Every structure is written in structure tokens, then in C-alpha cells.
Amino acid sequence: MAAMSDHRRAAPLTIRIGHDELVVRRRYEAASILNDVLIALWFVAGSVMFFFVAWETPGTWCFLIGSIQFLIRPALRLSRQFHLRRVRGGGAESGSAVTEAWQDF
């Protein structure tokens, strides 16, 4: 049964850079992690900017951008659900797909 679930998984994203390859195996999980890192960077930058009066407005914009970016994570989770159902058929046999999606986040 493990071979069947491996067969149904999406192919990894492979980016060739010269003689090297970058392989992204779980695209949605990787996108979610990257999104979380970017949110952290926006909030750290905004926090540092708030130490200086002249930088309060740009700091506020960093907080706003980070807050808006919080909407991306649920969108990624939702798109993964739809992607899994489309690829796996969405029937009773795809019950493991729902479990797998919850493990990503």
C-alpha cells in the first residue's frame, strides 16, 4: 500500500542551475515554510523600525504587509486540499489524502 501512495504523490519540482539541481519535494509545505519566514522578517523589520521615530511609518507598513501575508497560509492549505482531491479523485479511497494534508501544517 505504501507503493500506491508513493505513486500518487505529485512529482517533485526540479530546477536546474548549471550542473546542479534544486529539488522541492513537498511544494505546498515548502511554500508554507517560506511564507512563515517572510512573515517573521516583516515583523522583525517593523519592530526594529519602531525604535526610531523617523522609521515608524515604514515599520507600520512592514506590520501591515506581514499581517496581510498571514492570509497566504490558509490559502496554501486550502489549495493543497483541492489539489489532493483533484489528483486523487476525492472519493472514499482518498481518505489518506485528508490525513496527509493535515500533517503538512
Image: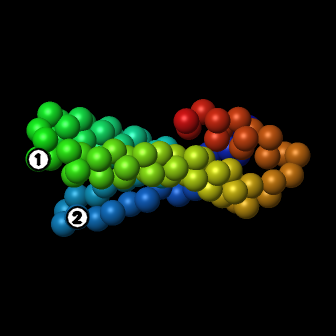
Give percent across and percent down for residue 30.
Answer: 43, 46
Q: Is residue 4 left or right of residue 6?
A: right
Residue behind mark 2: 17
Quadrant containing the C terminus is top right
Name the residue at the right extreme: 92
Residue drawn 86% across and 52% down? 91
Residue type at tag 2: Ile
Residue behind mark 1: 54
Give percent across and percent down for residue 27.
Answer: 48, 52
Q: Is residue 34 left or right of residue 5?
A: left
Asked if residue 56 shows in the view, the reply is: yes
Tell me: residue 55, above or below residue 16.
above
Give percent across and percent down for residue 76.
Answer: 55, 51
Q: Is residue 66 left or right of residue 91?
A: left
Quadrant containing the N terminus is top right
Q: Residues within 10 Å of mark 2 (few under 14, many from 20)?
A: few
Q: CA distance from mark 1 to mark 2?
A: 42 Å
Residue drawn 84% across and 45% down? 93
Q: Which mark is residue 10?
A: none
Residue drawn 39% across and 41% down? 36
Q: Of residues 34 and 42, which is closer to you in this image?
A: 42
Q: Residues within 10 Å of mark 1 (few under 14, many from 20)?
A: few
Asked if residue 31 shows in the view, the reply is: no
Q: Earlier in the sequence, mark 1 or mark 2?
A: 2
Which coloring applies here?
rainbow
